[in-house]
Amino acid sequence: MSHRFSVISVAPPDSILGITEAFNADPNPAKMNLSVGVYKDQSGQTPVLKSVKAAEKKILENEVTKGYLSIDGLPAYRDDVRNLVFGDSIAADRVAVLQTPGGTGALRVAADFMRTQLPGVRVWIPNPTWANHPAIFSAAELPVETYRYLGDDRTSLDLDGMLGALREKARPGDAILLHGCCHNPTGIDPTPEDWKQIAAVVAEKNLLPLIDFAYQGFGDGIEQDALGLRTILDHVDEALVCTSFSKNFGLYSERVGAVSLVASSADECSAALSQLKCVVRTNYSNPPRHGGAIVATILADAELTELWKQELEEMRLRITNLREQFVRQMESTGKGYDFSFLLRQKGMFSYSGLSAMQVDELKSKHGIYIVGSGRINVAGMSETKMDAFCEAVASVMS
Ligand code: LMR
């Protein structure tokens, strides 16, 4: 009997999550995983936030059903997403929000919606970007184009290069993927002034902004991090926004996200929502309840909201401290290792400038795992392992 699966070839490991698989298999007791974007506290744990624990307790006490949610998810959660992302900058009837399984789920729903409802659309993604972006759009059979993002120094945004490429090559109706804040993998964000220029080109070329907003609260603060997105929406009246609460609520494994569609009128918004619901129904039917219920429970309670904001602020500040500590310690070797550009980067990641060979050597000689592009998850560093980490980085650079 012939085996049909015998012809299937082995896919390469995922360029981010595959590293954790290799890390888990490594017997080295001194190993460090600074690859996947997950926050770890001083003890190396990815903690459950106190606000989340308290909300879960309330949910457990009060939950009366495990019945299906509607296709677009919990109403209170959807209102929360709308408030966090848009504030009161857009009339509620122009925004459709659907709860999704994580930010990745949101991106895939957005991608399938664009392919089915916006014929001919191409998606412009920055170079570099999160490795899963091109994979998601290709899986949805959308044509992908790249625009320049990083300058030749690899430490700054090449705004002129980016806008020049879009002006020259993007077609009206194309979508442009923008990272709302804490650009992944570089941590290099546009300034408020840059956002105005980006928004002007998006409007001039009639592009559809598709904003990946996975790190709200990790850059400069919850409200501050929404500035870029809101600047874009001052210039255009249509957009798609993909939110994730994996990082800012620490709800990674609960898969809590949302896709929000902004339309120019309430009627257009309702029609688009009906199509988004078809995408969801034929994919995962309706979202899981628990993660969304946690977010909604926290944000419905003033004390829990305050606690969550404090916990998020603590994570943000600790990442900033770790970044500073790394830069200072590398400088103090006296060997001319200048990583001060890291201090201008925002969010969980640092784009270190380490080459693929140096990344390999970190792994093979020191058991330190980072992403092939040289991206380091600063949020995974620890004060106690900083010496060992800096020594390893110095050794692969010498
Ligand atoms: C990352 O970039 O490490 C995170 O967004 C996690 C992931 O799914 O890749």
Image (cartoon, grey):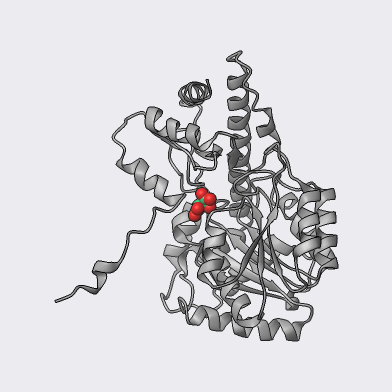
Quadrant location, the N terminus: bottom left
Q: Looking at the image, is 8 positioned above or below residue 274?
A: above
Q: Residue furthest left?
A: 1
Whether residue 12 is visible here, answered yes or no, is yes
Report the front residue among 190 and 285: 190
Q: Is residue 213 left or right of residue 282?
A: right
Give the residue drawn at x 76%, y 70%: 171
Instruction: Say if residue 251 shows up in the picture.
Output: no
The residue located at (53%, 24%) in the rendering is 397
**Where is residue 45 shown, x and y percent of the image?**
43, 40
Estimate the x, y position of residue 236 in percent, counting from the top left. Answer: 81, 69
**Residue 196, percent from left and from top:** 84, 55
**Point 52% across, 20% down: residue:** 398
Q: Position of residue 227 (x, y in %)?
A: 77, 54
Q: Nearer the viewer, residue 24 or 60?
A: 24
Q: Could you tell me which residue is drawn at 61 percent across and 69 percent down? A: 143
The relative height of residue 391 versus residue 80 in the rendered view (above or below) is above
In this rendering, position of residue 54 left or right of residue 97: left
Q: Which of 383/330 is in front?
A: 330
Please tell me whether residue 196 is drawn above or below residue 348 in the rendered image. Answer: below
Out of 169 and 190, give the one closest to the viewer: 169
Q: How many marks?
A: 0
Question: Left or right: where does residue 222 sit relative to residue 333?
Answer: right
